[in-house]
Amino acid sequence: MKYILLTLALISMQFSNAQLKPKAYKDGKQILNGFSILPNARLKTAPGVLILPAWKGIDNHSKETAEKLAKLGYFAFIADIYGEGNYPKNNEEAGKQAGYYKTNYVEYQKRIALALDQLVNMGANKEKIVIMGYCFGGTGALEAARSNMFVKGVVSFHGGLARDASRKITAIKSKVLVCHGADDPYQSAEEITAFQQEMRTAKADWQMVYYANAVHAFTDPEAGTDNSKGAAYNEKADKRSWQLFVSFLKEVLE
């Protein structure tokens, strides 16, 4: 009996003191460096969230998100899409890297799937997973839905919505949530209309919510507050979209 109690105490300590830890994994010979974190208090269904970072790769914003999710009881893993030796040093390099994966979306989907495996290996229930992403990562979340990865839902925060019109639209089974800045200059009206039509054609269970006075990157405190630059933090939109995200997680995972 004492042994059982000691074991339970150790498990409790493990979760209550959970910290973000680096995790190396591979795509063939390419080394990928993600981050994992266990939930502070494990929920009954052991749900997990895969985080896809913005175009510069794993950053403070994605790490803070993982820590917040752990406090809510979720297993979380931050994906490394680019891999060791390929991390962007500036916006120009980030644009090229992100552009490559947007064009070669099958490779993007593969890197997402590999990260998803890491999340499951941590202990997350493979039947209770949501993929979320910021900006370039938001595009990735939508790509996960388009390829029908076995996840309950996907969430895009100020992500790219465009897709090649020549791509065949297939049924989307996972639920889709898009949080979008109403004044985001990087998504045209035509791209938004095409995305919404795609969701209808795919018979998806989807939501697209607009946030007033918000431009691109509205959830990232490091983006500054000057909307004229096209990318800026908006505290109100950040808080409102996070509340919606948490509600979405509870709906599809718990």
Image (spheres, rainbow, N blue to C red):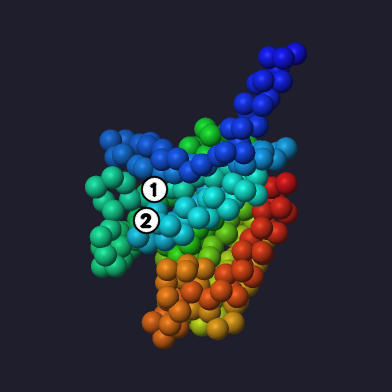
- Residue 178 picture location, percent across and down: 58, 66
Q: Give left or right: position of 2 versus 15.
A: right
SS for tag 2? Answer: loop
Q: Quadrant of residue 94?
A: bottom left
Q: In the image, is residue 147 above or below residue 124? A: below
Q: Give left or right: position of 7 versus 137.
A: right
SS for tag 1? Answer: loop
Q: Which residue is painted at 47% across and 67% down in the image?
A: 220
Q: Which residue is painted at 61% across and 32% down in the image?
A: 13
Q: Which residue is mark 2?
A: 57
Q: In the image, is residue 212 above or below residue 117? A: below
Q: Which mark is residue 80?
A: 1
Q: CA distance from mark 1 to mark 2?
A: 7 Å
- Residue 24 picture location, percent across and down: 37, 37
- Residue 66 picture location, percent across and down: 53, 50
- The answer to the question of whether label 1 and label 2 lie on touching residues, with beta carbons closer than 8 A, is yes
Amino acid at dot 2 = Gly
Q: Which residue is painted at 53% across and 76% down in the image?
A: 234
Label 1 neighbourhood size at 10 Å, few (<14), some (14-19), many (20+)?
Answer: many
Q: Nearer the viewer, residue 59 or 100?
A: 59
Q: Earlier in the sequence, mark 1 or mark 2?
A: 2
